[in-house]
Image (cartoon, grey):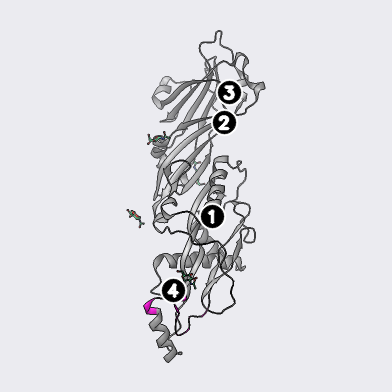
């Protein structure tokens, strides 16, 4: 065991945890170990899960199709968004509507936007943050004449005190723009701002204001416009470096070959997430072919057994002294990644790339 390379050891641990679960050993320790390796403190229990954003479905499906062709350098890049990263999260907005004392007549919506970043781990490097503001695309709601509306987005820098003139000092204006009210979604690059939110005390969120265009006189409350406001969400891409370095190319397919033999080789193991009681928070896949290594490592070791010189010597010693020295172990020597789409502990939707999830090849070590 002392000679098993570190990544294989880690992977063997992960696989053992999966196996224990799959085999019905309901001990909470393997489960919590596995959750921890997935970056979760406890098993998520989504209460009001948001619909899965189409961008995540698109990337997930593309990766499923590409699995097998994905090179190691691709694993830590999100090609679709052209940024480095292996974790994509869509944070749900947890801010409240603001009912300020003296609304401007044209102002029809004022809302705090808050995204809880506690899921981001320390070692993760934030590479992209994009805010999406969604409107229901209902022509009934479009104000007559297609008049423009004005959008202001500010970063909250301190608690806003009701009815004081200090409003300007507690906000930093990021965006002030006019838009035709026909967009289904508006997108804003918040990469810089979101980087500053890594420290929880610095994350006071944003203030979103919507108003009718000032050119319209007399201003009237464009209720239709504000009724068409649906929700906001923040797409965040980050890079967890320690997952990247272990990157290897997947070899053939998910399926291990089936040839009757008691020699060391990959055996088929399908892990179904519903069998382990994880179906309510793992969105996709429903399960996958994880495989495992099992079999003899007899003397003399043949080349197909992918042994080390040490293992060859160990089988020789074992054949001379079967009691004193064990056979080498049949362990994973090549593993490949999969992507999992799930809800985390804050009901955010996450697409994460996990290394070392599938055993492709075994060896005597
Ligand atoms: C953010 O989420 C964490 C974990 O769920 C929770 O402990 C914390 O209170 C939340 N913070 C805020 C400000 O809601
Ligand atoms: C978003 O902003 C960051 C930092 O200001 C910049 O590096 C990046 O290129 C921008 N992304 C896009 C898509 O414009
Ligand atoms: C991963 O590789 C990068 C560069 O290749 C290196 O800077 C970094 O220290 C490595 N991280 C780990 C955890 O090995
Ligand atoms: C050993 O590696 C070769 C390719 O390098 C592979 O074809 C073979 O299946 C592996 N042996 C086992 C037992 O996995």
Residue at 60% over, 13% down: 145
Q: Is residue 304 magenta?
A: yes
Camera-side mark, 2 or 1: 2
Picture residue at 50% right of the left edge, 64% below the top: 14
Which residue has dot 2 on it?
134
Q: Is residue 34 above or below residue 194?
A: below
Q: Position of residue 286 (x, y in %)?
A: 62, 55
Is 116 placed above or below 296 here?
Answer: above
| CA neighbours of label 3 inside 10 A, class few (<14), some (14 to 19), many (20+) | some
Tell whether label 1 touches label 3 (CB within 8 Å): no
Dot 4 corresponds to which residue? Answer: 306
Residue, x 59% and y 23% (percent of image)? 226
| Res. 106 visible in picture | yes
- Relative horizontal placement of residue 157, taking residue 208 as reference (left or right): left
Percent x, y of residue 296? 51, 80
Q: Which residues are magenta?
A: 295-310
**Label 2, label 3: how far apart the Cα atoms are:** 11 Å
CA–CA distance in space, label 4 to label 3: 61 Å
Return the residue nearer the eye: 132 or 270: 270
Q: Which residue is mark 3?
A: 182
Q: Callout 3: helix, strand or loop?
A: loop
Q: Is residue 348 visible?
A: no
> Of label 2 and label 3, which has the lower sequence position?
2
x 59%, y 67%: residue:
269
Q: Which residue is mark 1?
A: 42
Q: Is residue 338 left or right of residue 139?
A: left
């Amino acid at each position: 065991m002392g000679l098993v390379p570190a990544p294989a050891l880690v992977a063997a641990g992960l696989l053992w945890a999966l196996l224990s679960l799959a085999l019905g050993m309901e001990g909470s320790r393997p489960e919590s170990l596995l959750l921890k390796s997935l970056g979760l403190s406890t098993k998520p229990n989504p209460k009001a899960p948001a619909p899965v954003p189409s961008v995540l479905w698109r990337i997930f499906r593309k990766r499923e199709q590409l699995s097998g062709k994905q090179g190691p350098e691709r694993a830590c890049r999100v090609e679709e968004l052209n940024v480095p990263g292996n974790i994509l999260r869509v944070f749900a907005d947890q801010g409240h509507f603001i009912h300020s004392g003296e609304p401007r007549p044209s102002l029809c919506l004022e809302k705090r936007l808050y995204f809880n970043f506690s899921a981001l781990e320390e070692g993760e490097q934030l590479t992209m943050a994009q805010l999406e503001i969604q409107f229901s695309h209902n022509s009934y709601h479009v104000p007559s004449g297609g008049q423009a509306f004005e959008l202001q987005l500010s970063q909250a820098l301190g608690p806003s005190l009701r009815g004081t003139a200090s409003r300007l000092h507690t906000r930093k204006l990021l965006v002030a723009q006019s838009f035709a009210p026909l967009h289904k979604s508006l997108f804003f690059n918040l990469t810089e701002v979101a980087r500053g939110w890594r420290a929880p005390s610095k994350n006071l969120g944003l203030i979103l204001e919507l108003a009718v265009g000032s050119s319209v006189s007399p201003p009237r409350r464009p209720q239709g416009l504000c009724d068409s406001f649906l929700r906001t969400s923040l797409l965040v891409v980050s890079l967890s470096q320690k997952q990247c370095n272990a990157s290897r190319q997947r070899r053939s397919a998910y399926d291990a070959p089936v040839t009757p033999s008691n020699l060391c080789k990959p055996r088929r193991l399908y892990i179904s997430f519903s069998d382990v009681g994880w179906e309510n928070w793992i969105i996709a896949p429903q399960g996958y072919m994880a495989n495992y290594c099992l079999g003899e490592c007899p003397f003399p070791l043949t080349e197909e057994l992918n042994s080390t010189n040490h293992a060859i010597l160990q089988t020789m010693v074992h054949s001379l002294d079967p009691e004193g020295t064990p056979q080498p172990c049949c362990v994973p020597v090549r593993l490949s990644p999969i992507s999992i789409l799930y809800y985390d502990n804050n009901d955010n939707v996450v697409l994460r790339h996990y290394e070392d999830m599938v055993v492709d090849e075994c060896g005597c070590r």
